[in-house]
Amino acid sequence: MTYSEYVDQYLDSLHEAARKLDREAFGRAIEALRDAYAKDRQIFIIGNGGSAATANHFVCDFGKNAAPLEGARRFRIISLSDNVEKITAFGNDISFDEIFRQQLINLMNDGDVLITVSASGNSPDIVKACEYAKERRGTLIAITGMGGGKSRAMADISLHVPVENYEQAEDAHLIILHMFVDYIKKNRGYVLGLSQAKMSA
């Protein structure tokens, strides 16, 4: 296979998988974020490895850019993957399966939103966080690849990319999260409750 053929194959496969994204589920995710903003709820996001970087990237973009209107408050969003000291303390002293759940116990209130980013959807620390979010009657948005795993099965809203390649799954997950940011930037009036109309820029 030539370099050119490889590039074409990779991008074609990624495009094919991304095109299968559930549009209705995407809309429900936007509405869940809109509802969280209206009710001043906290949004949490978690991931491991490359998905941790994706989660942290999203917090930067979404927290800063989604609602920068003059005088408007921004979304309340936190990545539980960004504090190495806290993660390793919980992992060392309790269990690495508990690194996200233990943080949620301290921070999550009923009705808050948890977004999980996981290629397999089966990482034990992700699954335990999902279970706790359900206990707190939170809204669970699972972004997955492969078969979707346990987190997809537990989710209130599933954004699943049916691809077996980890790199492509992570590519698609960042695209989905960038779409959250871009949609809200283009529909700020509606999402922030300043207008009843959805209008793309």
Image: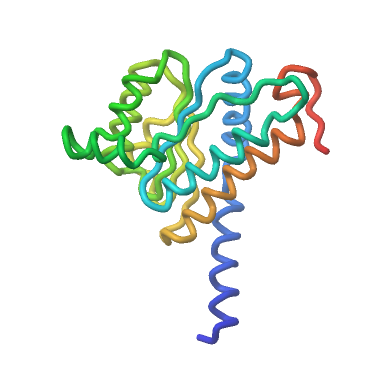
Q: Looking at this rendering, what residue extends furthest in the front direction?
A: 85
Residue in view at x 30 percent, y 28 percent: 101
Type of colouring: rainbow
State the quadrant of the C terminus: top right
Q: Quadrant of residue 3?
A: bottom right
Image spot of residue 167 (x, y percent): 45, 61
Q: Quadrant of residue 103?
A: top left
Query: Is 50 displayed left or right of 192 in the figure?
Result: left
Give the residue displayed 55% in from the left and 41% down from the top. Answer: 58
Is 173 situated left or right of 49 in this image?
A: right
Most extreme residue toward the left is 93
Compare residues 127 and 38 and report the one nearer the observer: 38
Identity of the residue drawn at 41% across and 59% down: 166
Tell me: 37 left or right of 111: right
Task: Please state the total of marks drawn on the protein image.
Answer: 0
Residue 38 in picture, x, y percent from top left: 63, 15
Place residue 109 in its image quadrant. Answer: top left
Front one among 43 and 124: 43
Q: Is residue 108 above or below residue 12?
A: above
Q: Position of residue 23 (x, y in %)?
A: 62, 39
- Asked if residue 63 is positioned above or below residue 50 in the image, the reply reads above
Asked if residue 115 can be seen in this view, the reply is no
Give percent across and percent down for residue 160.
48, 44
Residue 172 shows up from this direction: yes
